[in-house]
């Protein structure tokens, strides 16, 4: 079973101003002359983590990471102003132009798969291929499953902690109830709600309990941006048209695609991946038997590293053939 590539440090860091008062953190690592690949993190609001550049062979890839608006090391932190899906897609184009990249591969999990798909459907001519994990189509039923009682049937103990900040009278629409707390003026209630929201996701993300994953979701900096930005996106239907990703999947025709999804993903159930693959039959769907949602689970790591290796071989072969 494959695992992460060795730890590496960025060879260059950037602070990239974008319209609407945001400044994005971007870094580059690996081979400056390698295959450009953009790591698209989850959430929205999650930010990049310490393992995220280690899914790629650093000798073959020019690895580009960025923290989306309000996330991670981008500023202002947890800001909801001018923070929409079209804004993020436009930011990716700003980064591509800023770094002088003609085409790049996209690697995204969970919300990162959502944003990668929206970008690729908007700019297919800029995409070399996609590696996607834990598909999240942002349909109403996906949000209902995780935030209105579906996953609660599997995790009733964790669900009680998620319900705790919300008055019983407001529990018929938990996303909007949380949104009101997270955008309110009471900082104590806001931070408590952010931690409860984030911990619910972290606890449900792995097949087996994983202290490191839960601890990362509990950190106040991440919890605040994750909860505020996710709630903001979800009350606004992720700023997408109904079934937008599936309805526009024909625009992905001709692009290499690998879809990796844990069999026991309780955050984004497997039917998300099935619906995408049905609409994009050229993509290869790999179901990881002993895995949930998290990108750090051993079976998921193995599948993702194999996928990046395979994409590099394919792109190099195509390049040699064209030459």
Image: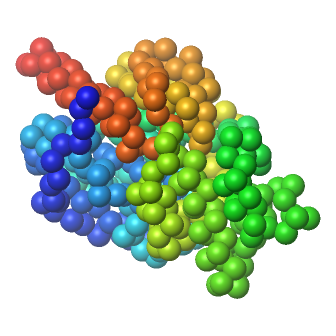
**Front-lying residue, 244 or 110:** 110
Question: Residue 35 placed where, x, y %?
Answer: 18, 37
Residue displayed at 78% across by 58% down: 174
Question: Residue 248 placed where, x, y %?
Answer: 57, 28
**Front-lying residue, 219 or 186:** 219
Question: Residue 100 placed where, x, y %?
Answer: 21, 50
Residue displayed at 23% across by 24% down: 310
Residue displayed at 57% across by 60% down: 199
Residue displayed at 37% across by 45% down: 296
The answer to whether residue 260 is above or below residue 31 is above
Which quadrant holds residue 18? bottom left
**Front-lying residue, 157 or 285:** 157
Quadrant (top left/top right/bottom left/bottom right) for the C terminus: top left
Which quadrant holds residue 304? top left
Left or right: 200 with respect to 171? left
Left or right: 107 with respect to 217? left
- The reply to whether residue 268 is in sight is yes
The answer to whether residue 223 is above or below residue 53 is below
**Front-lying residue, 50 or 98:** 50
Question: Residue 70 placed where, x, y %?
Answer: 48, 68
Quadrant (top left/top right/bottom left/bottom right) for the N terminus: top left
The answer to whether residue 254 is above or below residue 23 is above
- The reply to whether residue 128 is in sight is no
């Amino acid at each position: 079973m494959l695992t992460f590539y060795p730890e590496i440090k960025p060879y260059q860091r950037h602070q990239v101003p974008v319209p609407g008062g945001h400044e994005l953190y971007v870094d580059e690592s690996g081979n400056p002359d390698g295959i450009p690949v953009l790591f698209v993190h989850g959430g929205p609001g999650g930010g990049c983590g310490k393992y995220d550049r280690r899914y790629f062979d650093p000798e073959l890839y020019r690895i580009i990471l960025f923290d989306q608006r309000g996330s991670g090391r981008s500023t202002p932190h947890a800001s909801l102003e001018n923070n929409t899906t079209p804004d993020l897609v436009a930011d990716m184009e700003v980064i591509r132009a800023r770094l002088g990249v003609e085409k790049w591969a996209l690697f995204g999990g969970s919300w990162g798969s959502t944003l990668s798909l929206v970008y690729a459907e908007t700019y297919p001519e800029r995409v070399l291929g996609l590696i996607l994990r834990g598909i999240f189509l942002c349909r109403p039923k996906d949000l209902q499953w995780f935030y209105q009682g579906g996953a609660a049937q599997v995790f009733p103990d964790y669900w009680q902690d998620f319900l705790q900040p919300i008055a019983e009278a407001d529990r018929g629409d938990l996303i909007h109830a949380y949104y009101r707390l997270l955008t309110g003026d009471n900082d104590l209630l806001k931070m408590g709600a952010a931690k409860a929201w984030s911990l619910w996701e972290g606890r449900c993300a792995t097949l087996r309990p994983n202290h490191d994953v839960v601890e990362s979701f509990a950190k106040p900096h991440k919890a605040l941006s994750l909860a505020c930005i996710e709630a903001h996106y979800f009350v606004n239907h992720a700023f997408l048209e109904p079934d937008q990703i599936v309805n526009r999947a024909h625009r992905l025709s001709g692009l290499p695609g690998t879809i990796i999804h844990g069999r026991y993903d309780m955050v984004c159930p497997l039917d998300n991946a099935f619906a995408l693959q049905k609409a994009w039959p050229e993509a290869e769907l790999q179901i990881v038997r002993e895995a949930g949602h998290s990108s750090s689970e051993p079976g998921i790591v193995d599948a993702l590293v194999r996928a990046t290796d395979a994409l590099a071989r394919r792109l190099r072969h195509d390049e040699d053939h064209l030459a």
